[in-house]
Amino acid sequence: MTPHADLSEAQSREMVKWILSLKDPAAPRPAADSKSYTYTLKDGKTAKLDFSLFADGKGPKVTKTVFRGYELYNSYCYRCHGTDAAGSQLAPDLRHSLSAGMTRQQFLSIAMAGKADKGMPSWAGFLTREDITSTYQYVKGRSLDLVPPGRPPSEVE
């Protein structure tokens, strides 16, 4: 792992805490749905997720978690990764990254550790694992073209 000399002591501790939690089955984790959710894509294929994109499993209103991911993305990620996770000259299209096989764990690891050589900041100590997971769920929904561009309708409205 590359050194992160620009991290504060608190950020370093948060990153270490998060990394160590990956091997500790007793460490607190976000509540994971034990269910599987199947969605039909525009091309007729199906996608299975271990989380629900939509309230009551149906569109068009996204869950509170997915909507929170949208809010976080639009607060912190869009400046580099583009509006609606569509990429920009500064950073890649995250929809394509997930479609090309990036896993949730890879997404979380990159978001927490950052990529200093590419200008990606570390979000460890600033965003929680739950925040990054919410952001992942939003981007995953966008990558499948199930969550529409713009502000998605939410069950909280």
Image: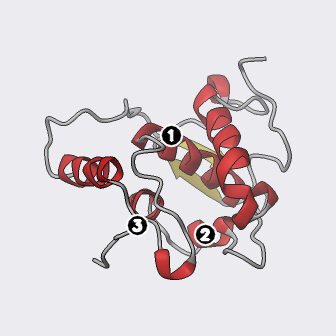
Which residue is depicted at the point 21% across and 46% down? 21
**Residue under pointer 2:** 99
- Residue reaching furthest to the bottom: 117
Element assignment for label 2: helix
Vertical side of 135 occupied by 5: above or below: below
Classify mark 2: residues with Cα within 10 Å, few (<14), some (14-19) or many (20+): few
Determine which of the numbered discs, if any, sits on residue 6 in the image.
3
Note whether residue 84 is visible.
yes
How far apart are the two marked residues, 2 and 3, measured between alpha carbons? 32 Å
What is the three-letter code of the residue carrying label 3?
A: Asp
Note whether residue 144 is visible.
no
Query: Is 49 on the left or on the right of 154, as rendered?
Result: left
How far apart are the two marked residues, 1 and 2, measured between alpha carbons? 21 Å
Vertical side of 156 occupied by 65: above or below: below
Query: Is 77 on the left or on the right of 157, as rendered?
Result: left
- Residue reaching furthest to the top: 157
Determine which of the numbered discs, if any, sits on residue 131 in the image.
1
